[in-house]
Amino acid sequence: MEELVVLVNSEDEVLGLMEKQQAHINGLLHRAFSVFLFNSKGEMLLQKRASGKYHSPNQWTNAVCSHPRKEETYLEAAKRRLYEELGIETELSEKFNFIYKADVGGGLWEHELDHVFVGNHESESDFNLNTDEVQEVRFISPENLDKEMTEAPENFTEWFKIILEEYKHHF
């Protein structure tokens, strides 16, 4: 099934729909969301993208990133993808939204109006990973994440670097 993204202007007014890969080739602004999950120790959940992804394979990123469907709210989409990718359900709260544009290689661009959600999850053992999307997950402390991103930035998705910096400005 062809996956469509919702094209918008900077005010989140819908301009139309476009096939996801074409929107990324054209670098057109579209709706997106990002989910950050933390455990009670303050560690962030990371997912490693599956090797078969058409861009940014084998790179670490936040718990879930994706796009809402045409008639779906950002929150509905975030909860859907948490379940589809990680096999979990948890409460989420929206913290902020912003627009960014990132070159993800291969002539592809992420240009997104991104709504960022935060939630809690404790265990690494109760995930049911969709291996078409996710290779593995792990929790990491903020200090170790900063260290890894400094030492090997190529191991992380371009959008995660941008979203994480924006996240730090809000908290």
Image: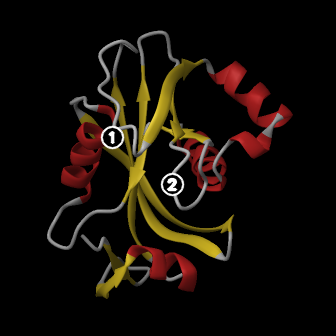
Horizontally, residue 168 falls left or right of residue 81, namely right
In this view, 98 is above or below 157: below
Q: Amino acid at mark 1?
A: Glu
Is residue 44 at least partly visible in the picture? Answer: no
Image coordinates for residue 23, horizontal then vertical, percent:
46, 80
Based on the displayed image, in which of its 4 quarters is residue 129 positioned?
top left
Residue sticking out furthest to the bottom: 15
Image coordinates for residue 134, horizontal then vertical, percent:
44, 38
Q: Which mark is residue 85?
A: 1
Q: How many marks?
A: 2
Horizontally, residue 164 falls left or right of residue 40, namely right
Which residue is drawn at the image coordinates 41% and 30% (left, top)? 37
In this view, 159 is above or below 50: below
Q: Nearer the viewer, mark 1 or mark 2?
A: 2
Horizontally, residue 106 falls left or right of residue 78, namely right
Q: Amino acid at mark 2?
A: Lys
Q: Residues within 10 Å of mark 1 (few under 14, many from 20)?
A: many
Image coordinates for residue 24, horizontal then vertical, percent:
52, 75
Quarter occupied by the N terminus: bottom left
In this view, 133 is above or below 110: above
Q: Secondary structure at mark 1?
A: helix
In this view, 124 is above or below 162: above
Which residue is drawn at the image coordinates 68% and 71% (left, top)? 106
Mark 1 or mark 2: name the one nearer the start of the chain.
Answer: 2
Q: Nearer the viewer, residue 46 or 41?
A: 46
Which residue is drawn at the image coordinates 25% and 29% (left, top)? 88
Which residue is drawn at the image coordinates 44% and 61% (left, top)? 114
Q: Which mark is residue 53?
A: 2
Image coordinates for residue 72, horizontal then vertical, percent:
17, 63
- As measured in the structure, the alpha-carbon distance from the residue carrying label 1 to the one carrying label 2 is 13 Å
Horizontally, residue 138 falls left or right of residue 83, namely right
